[in-house]
Image: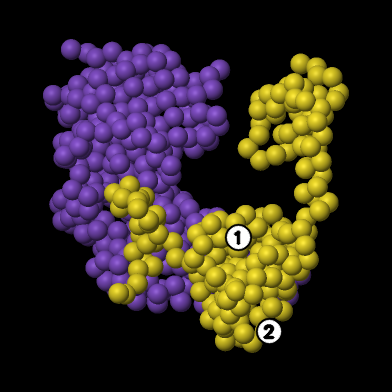
Chain colours: A purple, B yellow
Amino acid sequence: MHVQTLSLKHFRNYSETCIPLFPGINVFVGENGSGKTNLLEALVLLSLAKSPRGGGDKSWVAWGEHEATVRGWVNGKSTLQTLTLTYIHGSKQAFANEMRIERLMDFVGLLKIVLFVPEDLQIVGGSPRFRRRLLDTLIGQLKPLYLYHLNRYNKLLVRRNQLLKQPQTSSELERLLDGWDDLLSESAAYIIAARKSFIMHLKTYGEKAYGTLSQNKETLSLMYRAEGLPELQEASVPPDPLVERAFLQQLKEQLRQVFYQRRELDRQQGHTTVGPHRDDLLFFLNGRPADVVASQGQKRSIALAIKLAEVETIVQESGEVPLVLLDDVFSELDDERSGMLVQLVKKSEQSFITTASFQYLGKLKDASVYTVTRGRVRRVE
Amino acid sequence: MHYPLPLARLIEGFQKLPGIGPKTATRLAFHTLKMKEDDLRDLAEALLSVKRDLKTCSICHHVTDEDLCPICRDPARDRSTILVVEESKDVMAMEKMKEYRGLYHVLGGVISPLEGVGPEQLTIKPLLERLKDETIKEVIIATNPSIDGEATAVYLSRLIKPSGIRTTRIAYGVPVGGDLEYADEVTLAKAVEGRREY
């Protein structure tokens, strides 16, 4: 898919602007603070309805304004859609073809993206939160029900933790927790099954990409680590676990027991110590844990391979080629790996690259180049 | 802006109603200034009377102005089924469909750890008392499909099931007369999950 036009109103340092974009490679060149990353952020908002920078939704409204709008004209395989995300009266509203979409989760993924920021290079060895976010962002774009369960799970978790903090236990409280654990394990089972199944896709494509990067000297593999369910690590998942009611039911039952067994410990800790919010994605090089054995260079190669695998997974699962957004990553990579990155960019129908210097443009032939200065975007002919 | 005290009090009062912000409250307050005194007295009387004259039915806790609500008093109702709802307004909604002939039970809210609402603040004990009556064969739980509504439903079902009474939950799904294309994915998924055989 590709975005034909991006229009911004009161968005960060853009007062009102309309940028025509082209299929292929688009490069935004500008100094730090010029607003080039804001353009990528706008595209991410059209896809995920959430800023990758955090900091709350109000933060993307221009200083002194009360509402902001991001709008994109998006060409899909067989559709042309106008996607709009507005921040108004303190909340977000989403529209597709000018029709209001009541639930943001139904908006997420209409535009599909793969985002690559410098922090992604720490995917191996960095915080597990990073790796969970990678999975959630990928799956969320493809499965609306995943977002529903993720959202529900998080809300239930807050309530369970609240119940755990009650000073006195009673059979009444235990019965209440039984009820909450029941719903919690239902959503947890869906989340874990979905993550496991998508890790299988990432593994297939990631292995191949990493093989090419390392000239087949090393093999990469991936594994899901479910806290409190070690047996699940090795367990195979049916090809489409999300439609296998029996599989989900069994997983739910296992999780319900784990939540029950941990109840005492969780009460002492004051929060829930088990569940998908504590799980992790593990990487292995030649069968050994990558966070321990991999060099800095190898870790970067793994990050690259995973990004390639994300693109491939979205193509296979949805039939749409996602946009590839690269925020200032070229400067972080050596020649060989940036060559690989160029391959990734060429695979996509449309990509966006921000960079502070023209130095990397040599590798990107036929790119549309834009200069960005203080909230103004100009195409370089 | 400084309002005279009586007006300020009225604006503040209106703002306590749901869906009314400062702007609407001010508009309503200025409108009452123009109303006839008789109409205002009727309105004030009506406002006071809902609190003074209404109570909850001693069986089902639905709002009523008598000891028993008309539904509990009606001899034609089927006494073997109880439909459990959060609020009295849900009873009104159910009654509109004119298809349900059983009895109701109004919980008075849902269990909510965040709001500090526990089972003892709801009419769960009186419900369990009612279930001791052997004529009751089924309890249908119709709390809202919100997080707390769902959790309350699970809690109730676990509480009631051991007594051997049939416990069911209303189905979620596609609105009747609606077009599948326009139903959102989550609702559709829930509808497929709750499918039944012909």
Is A150 situated above or below A341?
below
Chain holding disc 2? B
The image quarter in which residue B30 lies: top right
Amino acid carrying label 1: it is: Val
Is A211 situated above or below A261?
above
Pinpoint residue B163: horizontal percent, then vertical percent: 61, 86
Question: Which of A367/A87 is in front?
Answer: A87
Classed neighbour count for the residue bearing mark 1: other residues with Cα under 10 Å, few (<14), some (14–19), many (≥20): some
Residue B184 image label: none
Pinpoint residue A212: horizontal percent, then vertical percent: 15, 50
Question: Which of A202/A32 is in front?
Answer: A202
Sequence order check, earlier mark of 1 and 2:
1
Chain holding disc 1? B
Instruction: Check whether the beta carbons of the residues at disc 1 and disc 2 lie within 8 A of each other.
Output: no
Q: Secondary structure at mark 1?
A: helix
Question: In percent of the image, x 25 and y 20: which residue is there?
Answer: A20
Q: Label 1 belongs to which residue?
A: B91
Is A107 situated above or below B115?
above
Work out how far the residue at label 1 is from the one at label 2, CA to CA, in angstroms: 23 Å
Amino acid carrying label 2: it is: Lys
Pinpoint residue B198: horizontal percent, then vertical percent: 30, 74
Residue B132 image label: 2
Q: Quadrant of the C terminus of chain A?
A: top left
Question: In percent of the image, x 22 and y 53: which residue is there?
Answer: A317
Question: Which of A79/B17 is in front?
Answer: B17
Pinpoint residue B48: horizontal percent, then vertical percent: 82, 44
Instruction: Left or right? Give the position of A11 relative to B73.
Output: left
Q: Is residue A16 visible?
A: yes
